[in-house]
Image (tube, rainbow, N blue to C red):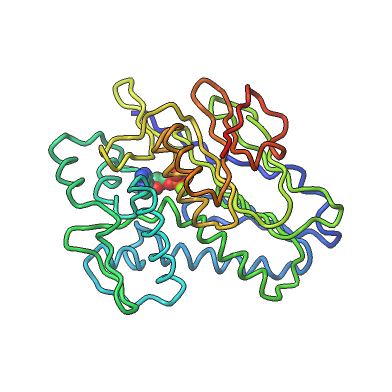
Amino acid sequence: MRYIKLWVLLLPLLLLGGCGEKQHQKQVYAMDTVMNLTVWGDGSALNDLQQLLQKAETQLSVTKPASLVSRLNAGETITPEGEIYALLEDAAALGEATGGSLDICLYPVTRLWGFTTGQYHVPGEGELEEALSRTGNQRLILENGTARLEAGAQMDLGAVAKGWAGAQCIRLLEKNSGVSCAMLSLGGNIQTYGTKADGNPWRIGVQNPKGSGLAGVLELEGTWAVVTSGGYERYFEENGRIYTHIIDPATGYPAENDLASVTIVSKNGLQADGLSTALYVMGLEKAAEFWRETGDFEAVFITKDGKLHVTAGLEERLKEPAGEVSVLEQ
Ligand code: AMP
Ligand code: MG
């Protein structure tokens, strides 16, 4: 069995020329990934950001026995602090809005495949069917400030946790942190904050899913979450077949369709992260339809034939495309 992992899906480009103040950088390992934090202004904010990210890992990790998620998975009823309660509510609602393409209670299945533990394994039909019968966003029960899971259900917030943590970082920076602008790269989830003093937009490179180099560069002004999901990000190979880490909750098997990657641009980090996963599961046609119906985010879809399909709001912001571009209209 061969296991391959590529971390970087989105690259912050040209970090020089920030907000006219001193630039400070820190590398942090949290939430199972390398994070690069860059702020302009008061560098002490980096320590606060690190603490926030490490706390998010402690609370949300599915592999740490003491995490809130593990306690829920062990059948406990918990009374989480308000921010976590809101995360659970929002993540379950987003899952429902995607018709279950995002399923925060997919852990019985993702665990079988071993993507969260590293014990990779192609499950048998029987065990997969049994695990699938215990999935579904509606199995999380939120009542009067408490959270619990239906018997047998298990949660994995891996599809939304980094996006949510990025949004929490922005809230921290907005609270008088002395930071005028920032670029946070949370293992490929990018979160920008504020406006650069030189008037130039942030430049974010979208990785070419088929090998090296960039598929394009997004130029964005102000505060945005930019998140990419792609099968090439984490996968293993068994008997000559490739199994990717994004699972179609309808079948329990890795999502396999015309898409090679999905990049979401949104003001809302949780939404950007959750939808990058969900729309990858849907395939281009359903994903484009979802965008037309929902409308409060933008996306770049890269299909396996190397074409870029960009939603209308990003047409002017996507630069240096490495393939043919078609624009999705409302
Ligand atoms: P992301 O990298 O944000 O696309 O999230 C992928 C991770 O979320 C995987 O490594 C699994 O832990 C989990 N996951 C995989 N498929 C799904 C799905 N359809 N819905 C929710 N979580 C998923
Ligand atoms: Mg995601």
Quadrant that contains the C terminus: top right
- Residue 32's spot in the image, x, y percent? 47, 52
Q: Is residue 2 above or below residue 50?
A: above
Say left or right for 136 vs 209.
left
The structure residue drawn at horizontal position 57% and vertical position 24%, both measured from the top left corner, is 307
| Residue 207 image-quadrant placement | top right
Quadrant that contains the N terminus: top left
User: Of 235 and 193, which appears nearest the observer?
Assistant: 193
The structure residue drawn at horizontal position 24% and vertical position 71%, both measured from the top left corner, is 76
The structure residue drawn at horizontal position 68% and vertical position 45%, both measured from the top left corner, is 12
- Residue 248's spot in the image, x, y percent? 32, 39
The structure residue drawn at horizontal position 17% and vertical position 48%, both measured from the top left corner, is 133
Q: Outermost residue, left direction? A: 126
| Residue 115 image-quadrant placement | top left
- Residue 275's spot in the image, x, y percent? 47, 47
User: Of 88 and 234, which appears nearest the observer?
Assistant: 88
- Residue 160's spot in the image, x, y percent? 45, 54
User: Of 136 and 238, which appears nearest the observer?
Assistant: 136
Count of all numbered marks drawn on residues in the image: 0
Say left or right for 206 vs 316.
left
